[in-house]
Amino acid sequence: MIGEELVQLLTPEGERVSHPEYESSLTNDQIVSYYRDMVIVRRICTESTSLQRQGQLALWAPIQGQEAAQIGAGRALEPMDFTFPTYREHGIAWCRGVPPEDMLRLFRATSNGGWDPQKYRHSVPTVVLGNQALHAVGYAMGVQRDGAEEAVMAFFGDGASSQGDVLESFVWASSYNAPIVLFCQNNQWGISTPMSIQSKIPLYHRAHGFGFPGVRVDGNDLLAVYEVSKRALDNAREGGGPTMIEAYTYRLGAHTTSDDPTRYRIDAEVEVWRHRDPIERVKALLVREGTVRASYFDEVAEEAEGIALKLREDVLAMGKPDPLTIFDNVYADVHPLIEEGRREMVELGVAGGGH
Amino acid sequence: MATTTMTMARALNEGLRRAMEENKKVLIMGEDVGKLGGVFRITDGLQKDFGEDRVIDSPLAESAIVGTAVGLAIRGYRPVCEIQFDGFVYPAFDQIVSQVAKLHKRSDGVYTMSLVIRLPFQGGIGAIEHHSESPEAYFAHTAGLRVVSCATPEDAYWMIQQSIHHDDPIIFCEPKCRYWEKGEVDTERPPRGLFDAVVRRPGRDVTVVGYGASVRTMLRAAEAAESEGLSLEVIDARSIAPLDLDTMAASLERTGRLVVVHEAPHTASIGSEIVSSLTERCFYSLRAPGLQVSGYHTPYPPSRLEEEYRPSVDRILDAVDRVMEFES
């Protein structure tokens, strides 16, 4: 899989490697801090999977294996940039400051969103594959019209890369030279659909056909994802137009908690990718270079444990919302059918909170 | 009173121009809307006056026209999307139903989906397939959307501006066969609210409700009925979703007889909705079941046959006769 076109700055063994076009600019402090991010989001993810198995979440979409892709991109963003996620961007949400319990409101089925998208500059989850890519390009066209130095990042996966909306977003991004980074996490599987069915060419090659650069980066390499994302974002802010990034990675877990990947892929493949674990390779680097004291890894694991425990408590405390909230924010202005529905519910006496 | 005579096409153009002058966040986007001024010339001259950044000639993909408008609305703009013809709106259906309609709710009210989707609809211009459809019920069915239709130049002038100023997403249905018909437009103040139905012609015997191109046909039917001694009250619904049922019910309480006119097939249509809602409200005043005069349950026909398909004066009068036959 690792062709010469794949940008890699850190090998699976945790050794730094050079690349003709990219060089790691991360300080040791940053690497240490982003290692912590990855450990925490993985722990959030395992806790959420447990919560789902215990019947406390309707669903969960795990990100194990994709932590470097998300933390690398998420940490390359500036505060004023704006991001448009799918339902699997927990690492990006973490980087944008979305509280973990807010990430789970969708999956706890108490909300169809979960956080204030303007506050975190991270849009609400999009479940219909690919719709958000067009929103991101439109938003970027707004940035352009405002003359603002901001970039926009759209997230989607290899599965959504076949959607018309994603390909139309490429056309629009190109036609208007929009300040956008189209960030594709190619985790090799669209539920059971392998890459070989989604595309006969590497996904990043598609960008060239639309008239802007595409870069394939080792999506399990924090250092490389960060640099490739940062350059693309800087370029967008400076008026250089769109870039597509294909973060070549792997979904170690299931598509969602409703999925059973043993039905369509072999263990040997998963094993190969386990050896490319994005967190282990940063850990190996930190050990190799003696960047942190030996106890650091345990401290981070302990901190992650605490975050997971608090998340569990917060989720369990999330009760059934007041039924009358069904009628909130359907319209911005008064609407007779909303008034009618609300009145009917009140008269039936089902209103009020409770579990 | 500053009253001017103009066509509906001109009124829409003037309304758009005024909205753009009043608010820099108003944008127009769509296929051929700039240099060409739209295939119906509704946006004629606007790109010249407001620039390419505000009147955006787009590539040819309806989902992207609406999808990027969503992003612009999130950014605080008020985009007006033109879908060239009714039958071409379906590629954008996913964006309209899954995103435009639901993002205000999904974001707990943080996002304002202040966008207008202009849709030249209904038939009557002798076009080829996909250029004469009435898809309004699909959108009326979706919570989060509002659907309106203008029937006169004055309404066109004001309703387009009211829609642009409104914070909810609005599907703006324009009866394309009336684009070239002239009418008086008072450009000083809007005659009524965006969601209010209006009695276009008072009458005693039968309440006839419709919208868009059907309004003119209903008025002609009312004239013809008068010569037969029947008095029709003609109501222009104007707002398709939500419906102004109060205005319609007030009329039906007096007449006791209802005919609804529209060009879509009648199953699960706006006509069905009006008949059902008014039956519920006015049951004890009804002297006959409410009837629909609509398109047939077929694809819109080749346009050499469209006058047999669309509600005509004769078909409306036939329905009027049928509701009059019921004894009270």
Image (cartoon, coloured by chain):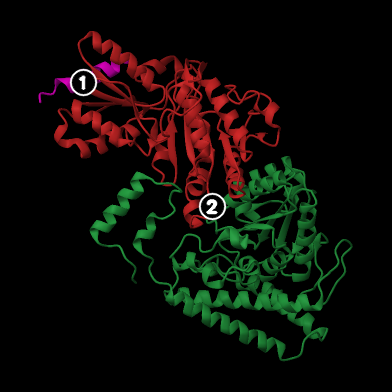
Chain colours: A green, B red
For the stretch drawn in magenta, what is the main secondary structure? Answer: helix
Q: Is residue B57 visible?
A: no
Q: Amino acid at mark 2?
A: Tyr
Q: Residue at x 38, y 68 (%)?
A: A320
Disc 2 target residue: B111
Mark 1 surroundings: few (<14), some (14-19) or many (≥20) residues within 10 A = some
Measured from the top left, where is residue A77 in percent x and y?
72, 62
Disc 1 target residue: B204
Residue A153 quadrant: bottom right
Residue B11 lies, with reference to residue B52, above or below; the image says: above
Q: Is residue B291 visible?
A: yes
- How far apart are the alpha carbons under marks 2 and 1? 46 Å
Query: Within the magenta stretch, is there residue A229?
Result: no
Residue B183 lies, with reference to residue A284, above or below; the image says: above
Q: Residue at x 89, y 62 (%)?
A: A20
Q: Chain of mark 2?
A: B
